[in-house]
Amino acid sequence: RNNQIYYLHHSLLFFLLVELVEFVVEVDSMRGSWTSFTPRLEITGMRMLTSDDNSASLEIDEVYGEVDVLDTLLSGSIQFYALVSSGVRADLDVDAEGQLSLRGLPGAAGDGFANPLYDFVFNSERLGFKDVSLSIHDGEEQYRVFVEAELWRDQAFRRFTMSLLSPSREAWFNVQAEGEGDLLEFSDFNGVFHLETHLGQLAAYAEFLTPLGLLVEAGSADAELWVELTEGRAEVAAEISASDLQVAKTDNPGRSYRADSVDGTLRADYQDGRW
């Protein structure tokens, strides 16, 4: 009977792993255990292989997970109490529409991948990503991004923190958010969001300002954004400070405008479909 439980246990863990990633995976070691009715999974040396030359598009040094068996059986998809990954390295491609996909795995993009990922992330009770290194390939440009993130959920309450650093672009982002309610129903979600960022090379993000008719050629900026959601009402506040700014109009790129410093604040309320 002990042998039957052992093989059933490891078969379940293997099934959960395959269902989670849905790609060819290699692991150096996988160990499982039970605590009460909670299977625990520990993986070291996990590699997700590309479909062409079997090179590793995603590598994770360590993965620890606690599976929610009841919710997994009821929902038909894997549910975790906790999933923590550390030492993550990934190669990502950016397509013409700006969507990210794992290099060599074209199926790992679009709604076919994003929708199950959304369900997985927001149904888990605790997710952690430590020491994450992303190598992003955007046309001829390649740059590296370092990420730390954690999501914690208790019933309908969620807390999320993330830090992001891009040394080559001299940029960093810190995000903190928490709230309670249905994320898909604006009027039923109450929470707060805070973003703090430094952009040392504004020209690297020029594409985000072209809809405003501006072409950013040089400069740096610091910004903070606060959003508070309360029963369908949103209160927004923002501060921005830019220095050594050089911009041009998209319809007249030959003429540039310079400013040593630019400061601004924004406050707005949204309710009943109106700002």
Image (cartoon, helix red, strand yellow):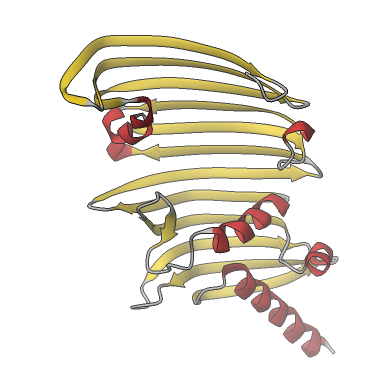
- The image shows residue 118, relative to residue 75, as above or below, that is above
Residue 163, how many percent across, how many down? 49, 37
Residue visible at 64% across and 44% down in the picture: 151
Residue visible at 72% across and 33% down in the picture: 179
- The image shows residue 255, relative to residue 201, as above or below, that is above
- The image shows residue 1, relative to residue 141, as above or below, that is below
Answer left or right for 72 relative to 114: right
Q: Nearer the viewer, residue 274 or 7?
A: 274
Residue visible at 49% across and 21% down in the picture: 224
Q: Quadrant of residue 114?
A: bottom right
Residue 168, how many percent across, how many down? 28, 39
Q: How many marks?
A: 0
Name of the residue lying farthest toward the front: 251
Whether residue 201 is visible here, answered yes or no, is: no
Residue 62, how many percent across, how many down? 54, 61
Whether residue 5 is visible here, answered yes or no, is: yes
Q: Quadrant of residue 200?
A: top left
Answer left or right for 158 relative to 114: right
Quadrant (top left, top right, bottom left, bottom right) of the C terminus = top right
Name of the residue lying farthest toward the left: 254
Q: Quadrant of residue 33?
A: bottom right
Residue 157, how many percent across, how many down? 77, 38
Q: Nearer the viewer, residue 55 or 264?
A: 264
- The image shows residue 189, relative to residue 267, as above or below, that is below
Quadrant (top left, top right, bottom left, bottom right) of the N terminus = bottom right
Q: Nearer the viewer, residue 258 or 243?
A: 258
